[in-house]
Amino acid sequence: MSRSTDPERAKRLNAAHALLARGEEMAKAADILVNRYGVSRRQAYRYLEEVQELGHPVPVGEVSVPMTIKVPESVAQRLREESRTRGLAIGEIVARAVRDWVARERGRG
């Protein structure tokens, strides 16, 4: 079985949270997750245990799509350094920068 994407995982965690929040017992909640998402019973319990520790739903992110761009070599080097320093993927750094830029530009309009 393939691994779930981050948005899929978040949806499953939120489903686990909702089941526990409405008072389902662990065994019943695990059965529901197995039937709804086709995960193993063991994985269903992992979701339930993780969300119990968190105590709240998790945000559902967007699916990332590949995109090729050309940037100056110095920018690429800086992105690599930031990626290593922050422990973030280059795509995440670029996505955050673009979101911030778009928000600033909209504020000027």
Image (tube, rainbow, N blue to C red):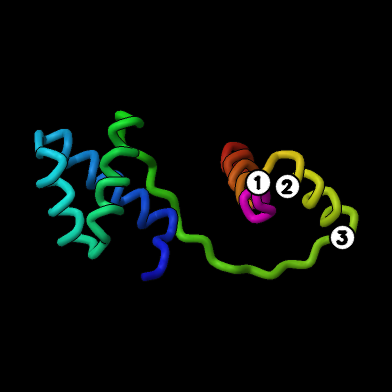
Residue 8, percent from left and from top: 36, 57
- For badge 2, the amino acid type reads Ser
State how far apart marks 1 and 2 are (Cα). 5 Å
Whether residue 91 appears in magenta in the rendering, the answer is yes
Task: Give the SS element for disc 3.
Answer: loop
Q: Is residue 40 left or right of residue 104?
A: left
Determine whether 79 is above or below 65 in the image: above
Label 1, label 3: how far apart the Cα atoms are: 20 Å
10 Å neighbourhood of mark 1: few (<14), some, or many (≥20)?
A: few
Q: Point out residue 50 in the picture as x, y percentages from the top left corner.
A: 34, 39
Identity of the amino acid at label 1? Answer: Leu
**Looking at the rendered structure, which numbered label has been put on residue 83?**
2
Q: Which mark is residue 88?
A: 1
Magenta stretch in the rendered image: 89-94
Q: In the current view of this chain or complex, which residue is farthest to the right?
A: 74
The disc placed on residue 72 is: 3
